[in-house]
Image (cartoon, rainbow, N blue to C red):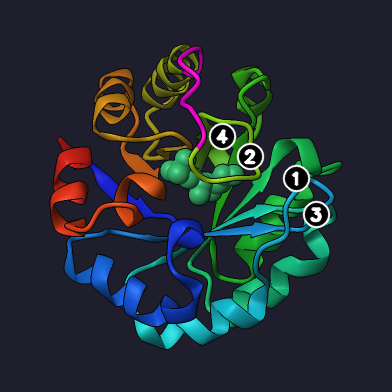
Amino acid sequence: MIKIAPSILSADFSKLGEDIKEVELAGADYIHVDVMDGHFVPNITIGPLVVEAIRPITTLPLDVHLMIENPDTYIPHFAKAGADIISVHVEACRHLHRTIHLIKDQGVKAGVVLNPATPVEVIETIIEDIDLVLLMTVNPGFGGQRFIDSVLTKIEKVSALVRSRGLSVEIEVDGGVNKVTAKKCIEAGANVLVAGSAIYNEVDRSLAIKNIRG
Ligand code: DX5
Ligand code: ZN
């Protein structure tokens, strides 16, 4: 089953609650929350306060994508604020195993994120401990960027790894996902598709989600 995770980065922050409710009613499966610190990525977005504020707005899982340095410091705050899934960048974790277990100790699902240039081999030793692998299909930091096609091979590799180990790890893609690139990702083995501009820049969000789901 293909899941769609609208990224609120492209929502209208002056009416964030309404924009979340709207995609929930339009058939979204997760709400993707992009957390940026101005250090790991060249942009600053939101913190635990906003996660806490949107928690009562939706019953959908909050899929929190941390693009921050020192994630261990902030993971308990995001968990307490109501995150259901917390994903950390392998490039930002000095002790990935410790960080993953810190997430799980909070009773939250754990994901590992790989930038486009990071090889999939880095997850071979941690994949049995996680719930989700998030493959960036753009360089993180901004919405509305162009999909990087070379990541498709990485999706195939992760998909083969998950199957060969008999795991139920979700494979999520993030960045430049639209109805055309979504099809390629699904064919390569992805099952959770994040989309910001391809949903929030459309007037008919229901149709946008339907088109991405394929
Ligand atoms: C990028 C973020 C994405 C972003 C995707 O750093 O992680 O979640 O919102 O936006 P689109 O779908 O517009 O590329
Ligand atoms: Zn994201």
The answer to whether mark 1 and mark 3 are in CB contact below 8 A is yes
Q: Which residue is mark 3?
A: 38
* Residue 181 to residue 119: above or below: below
Distance, label 4 to label 1, CA atoms, is 25 Å
Category of crowding for the residue at label 1, using alpha-carbon neighbours closer than 10 angstroms: few (below 14), some (14–19), many (at least 20):
some
Q: Quadrant of residue 189?
A: top left
Residue 74 x/y as whole percent: 76, 68
**SS at mark 3?**
loop
The answer to whether mark 1 and mark 2 are in CB contact below 8 A is yes
Label drawn at residue 140: 2
| Amino acid under disc 2 | Pro
Category of crowding for the residue at label 4, using alpha-carbon neighbours closer than 10 angstroms: few (below 14), some (14–19), many (at least 20):
some
The quadrant in which the C terminus is found is top left
Magenta span: predominant SS is loop
Residue 85 x/y as whole percent: 50, 60
Instruction: Tell me if the residue at label 2 has its CB under 8 Å from ligand 1.
Output: yes
**SS at mark 1?**
loop
